[in-house]
Image (spheres, rainbow, N blue to C red):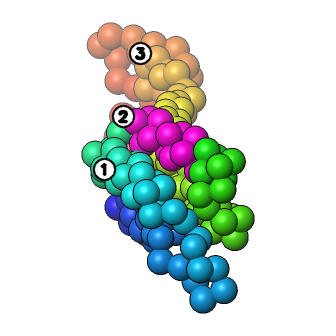
């Protein structure tokens, strides 16, 4: 449950990072069309993660990474916004990678057992039928 919450928070931050609202010192941080495409990829990542399909979520995250790389290359996103989005992608990837990793199977614990001694346990020899053991005599 905690892992899912971490993924949800990271996805929300990623979605916010892809939003096209400009900062005061960065008037056009992300082209609106690119922002919509990035947000669509974020939704795909979040939906797959919510379904527990972490491999698919990682694949959608790869698509998001490719879209960000293309946006950086063609100047559709500023360097500062790209850095912010990349940090969010990296955080979500780390969470998804951890969630996608198979849990190690517990190793069976075997405690050594001592073999049972034959007989009454006093001599290690089997009891003779018809004779009481040494500890059975009345004094």
Q: Residues within 10 Å of mark 2 (few under 14, many from 20)?
A: few
Secondary structure of the residue carrying numbered label 3: loop
In reply to whether residue 84 is colored magenta, the answer given is no
Which residue matches tag 3? 127
Please state which of the two labelled residues, at mark 2 or mark 1, is closer to the viewer: 1
Looking at the image, residue 27 lies above or below residue 126: below
- Residue drawn at 59 percent across, 57 percent down: 76
Question: Where residue 53 appears, x then y in whole percent?
Answer: 35, 39
Q: Mark 3 or mark 2, which is nearer the start of the sequence?
A: 3
Q: Which residues are magenta?
A: 55-68
What residue is shown at x 32% (from left), y 10% (from top)? Answer: 129
Q: Which mark is residue 16?
A: none
SS of the residue at dot 2?
Answer: helix
Query: What is the crowding at mark 1: few (fewer than 14 residues within 10 Å), some, or many (at least 20)?
Result: some
**Residue, disc 2:** 136
Where residue 57 sits in the image (x, y, percent)?
A: 42, 42
Residue occupying the point 41% across, 15% down: 127
Image x and y of residue 20, in percent: 47, 70
Residue denoted by label 1: 47
Res. 17 in view: yes
To which quarter of the image does residue 124 belong? Answer: top right
């Amino acid at each position: 449950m905690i892992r899912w919450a971490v993924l949800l928070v990271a996805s929300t931050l990623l979605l916010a990072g892809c939003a096209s609202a400009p900062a005061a010192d960065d008037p056009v941080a992300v082209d609106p069309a690119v922002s919509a495409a990035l947000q669509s990829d974020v939704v795909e990542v979040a939906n797959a993660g919510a379904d527990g399909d972490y491999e698919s979520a990682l694949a959608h995250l790869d698509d998001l990474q490719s879209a960000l790389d293309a946006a950086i290359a063609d100047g559709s996103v500023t360097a500062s916004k790209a850095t912010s989005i990349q940090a969010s992608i990296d955080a979500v990837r780390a969470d998804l990678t951890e969630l996608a990793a198979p849990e190690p199977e517990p190793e069976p614990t075997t405690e050594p057992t001592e073999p049972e001694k034959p007989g009454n346990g006093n001599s290690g020899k089997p009891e003779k039928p018809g004779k009481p053991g040494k500890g059975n005599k009345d004094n």
